[in-house]
Amino acid sequence: MTYYLNLQTLKNKIMRNFLAEAIARFKAPTPAFFKKLIVFGSSLTGLSLSLIAIPGLPAAIVSLTGYLATAGAAIIAVAKFAVQNTDPNQTPQQ
């Protein structure tokens, strides 16, 4: 029983640390290139969603616009979590 509680406590700590890191990355400044990706992803998603709303489009175009909306949302999510390096002494890892 205590083993389960310790494991659950550890799991909760890991999840809290993960969420805290995700929130910190979301609020951190974004590099210029990734800001452009956010704009591109937003445009792609907006365009595809507006095309979905047009009645009478062939099924292939509607499914393609669904994929474009998903791709745009994925681009936005990945670009938003990119963080600008604030330490000038730190070199990029290779």
Image (spheres, rainbow, N blue to C red):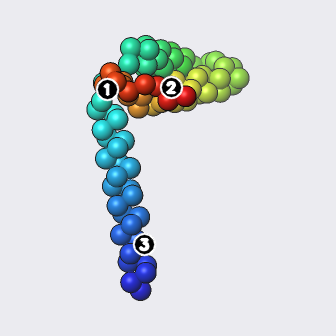
Residue where numbered disc 1 is placed:
87
- Left or right of 61? Residue 48 is left
29 with respect to 51 (left or right): left
Looking at the rendered image, the disc whose residue lies closer to the viewer, 1 or 3, is 1
* Distance CA(mark 2)–CA(mark 3): 35 Å
Task: Write down the residue under mark 2.
Answer: 75
Checking the image for residue 54, the label placed there is none
Residue 90 sits in quarter: top left
In the rendered image, the quadrant that contains the C terminus is: top right
66 relative to 76 in the view: left or right: right
Identify the secondary structure beneath mark 1: loop
Find disc 3 in the rendering and name its residue. 7
**Mark 1 / mark 2, whichever is N-terminal:** 2
Residue lying at the far front in this picture: please name it: 89
x, y percent for residue 26:
33, 34
Q: Amino acid at mark 3?
A: Leu
Q: Identify which amino acid the numbered label 1 is placed on.
A: Asp
Front in this rendered view, residue 76 or 81: 81
Q: CA distance from mark 1 to mark 2?
A: 26 Å
Query: In the image, what residue occupies the spot 38% across and 56% down?
Result: 15
Q: Secondary structure at mark 2?
A: helix
For the residues bearing labels 1 and 3, Cβ distance under 8 angstroms: no
**Residue closer to the observer: 65 or 88:** 88
Q: Are marks 2 and 3 in contact (CB under 8 Å)?
A: no
Please state, as top left, top right, bottom left or bottom right, where the N terminus lies in the image.
bottom left
